[in-house]
Amino acid sequence: MNKRLVMSVLLAAMLAACSSKAVKETPQAAVEDKSPVATQTTTSNESATSGVSDSSLASNPLKDPNNILSKRNVYFDFDSDAVKSEYRPLIEAHAKYLTSHSDAKVFLQGNTDDRGTREYNLSLGQRRAVSVKKVLNLLGVQDAQIETVSFGKEKANTTCADDSCYKQDRRVDIIYQGE
Amino acid sequence: MNKLRLFLSLLVFILPLSAKAALTIEIVGGAAQQIPIAIVPFAQPGQIAGQQDTIANIIGADLRRSGLFRVLETRGVANQPSDISQVSYSDWAAIQAQALTIGSIETLPGNRLKVSFRLLDVYKQNQLVGMEYNITPAQLRMTAHRIADVIYQKLTGEPGVFATRISYVTKTNGRYSLQVADADGYNPQTVVSSVEPIISPVWSPDGTRLAYVSFEKKKPIVYVQSLVSGQRTVLANFKGNNSAPSWSPDGKRLAIVLTYAANSQIYSINADGTGLQQLTHTSAIDTEPVWSPDGRYIYFTSDRGGNPQIYRMSTSGGDASRVTFEGSYIVSPRISPDGKSLAYIRRDEGRFRVALQDVASGQVQILSDTARDESPSFAPNGRMILYATRINGKGALAAVSADGKVRQRLSETGGDVREPAWGPVVSQ
């Protein structure tokens, strides 16, 4: 039973490795192969944690809904990249986690609302991600643990017409590597 | 794996997904002075395999769409020549045709076709131009576009761009697809598709490659993909964002935007991903670089002055000079093929519109009448500007002539269309 599991995990990893190679070269394959690539990460994660009991997952502070570390969104005012003081405790908690888990890595994903053009909004989303990074840096987190990226307005609500929904899109998401 | 790969590339690059138009182009305005032209149906030996439309119809649609021609109804005219010896000029003068196009298709051995056409001046009663093409049946549509280009050039004095291709990104049911189609929207083919966004496609100057930004790895990475083989390479995958590619006029280098751990800055890099060089060194946003056609300058968007405006610097970097001064939000610069005009997106009272600035005088004209415009792209002859906008809440493409008089709307039946880029004229 265990052997079969190992085999299938291995096989899945091999398949994923095989298709991830195709990603580089064949565009159409890249398309269809995206899910196997995603599976690869999941697979390796699962195999890595397979020896650990399920309770470890529940006690993972990053996933625990009662833990501030499960809160991952920092929202911004219109046309602003200033981190509002209300998000200070959230960012401090992540800084503490990162400084005490030197192998952990976060992606700070910047976003904007739907107004404006794609490439410029990509830069504006980046500026917000950089703002959050600077706070983390001040709290002692090393650059090597942080990657700032931006989705610009690509994930924004396109049917939005007022600030009730625009404000939801002006944000930075904190995503841990492997999530 | 190799077999699968071959099969997939065959599927995408050799078999067109559909010969039908996915984009339909509707012309909204026209020039005040349109040239009246009659196009007689070409004589042909019955239906040609794979033919969906007649040459005369394709030529007529091209010329009509340019806004510069009035294509006359020829059915009521008794004279239906296919050779110059059969032309009765008085019949065509009677319907006020200024120009007359006649032609024929003959079958040749080896499944080839000979397409002949003549463009005639009805008043002077002489031939303006005549040409012959020896083609395969599959080249019939593109040959019609080439004939339309010859007619356009002869009668307007400017090169035609009907035999070119455009690229754009569709979003249908949450799936993004980078497509390449003929300039009239026919023969759409998928270059790459993904569940994550694809933005900023740009054509290499020789029309054989596209550079674009894909988020398929959950961050923006710049790829270069051959339209001939389908092969693609990662151009830039550095820490942070990789975006806004633009080709140098000789196709050897690209300007790109990288962030590492800070704000967007402009770099240049060889088309094979080597030789990275940083061009801007500011703490502001510097993005959307575009090469001037003479290869001397890079125009770009920067908010170093407090709000986004267009600047210009040498292609080797260094000091930049500000180019735009009106308005508080000016982005997405594109320089015309002759280098004399600068198109960009300008925000005025919440409306984002295409504007055109004369580089020498600085004079600005707002060209579009829409409100959510993005990503302008010059036709290779500089006459039209293709751009993305929103019509009835849906992403759509539109085009406007550089003089603002001709407007087109290109709509997709399925989902959203955005990120258009007009490909170059490719000599064949």
Image: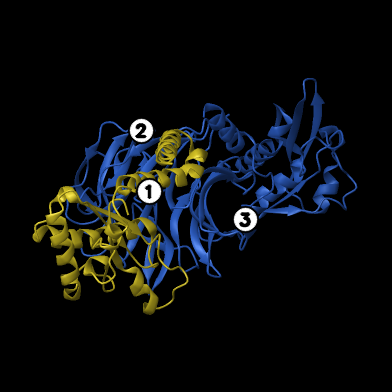
Cα separation between marks 3 and 1: 55 Å
Q: Secondary structure at mark 2?
A: loop
Eye-nearest disc, 3 or 2: 2
- Alpha-carbon span between mark 1 and mark 2: 34 Å
Supply the letter of whichever chain is yellow: A
Is B39 drawn above or below residue A126 in the view shown?
above
Q: What secondary structure is marked by label 3?
A: loop
In the depicted structure, whether residue B184 falls above or below residue B113: below
Give the structural element (helix, strand or loop) at label 1: helix
Crowding at dot 3, Cα within 10 Å, few <14 / some 14-19 / many 20+, comes out as many
Residue B309 visible in the shown view: no
- The number of numbered discs placed on residues in the rendered structure image is 3
Which residue carries the number 2 mark? B271
What's the amino acid at mark 3?
Gly
Q: Amino acid under label 2?
A: Ala
Both on one chain, marks 3 and 1? no
Q: Which chain is blue?
A: B
Q: Give how far across and how far down residue B162 sits, in percent.
A: 61, 43
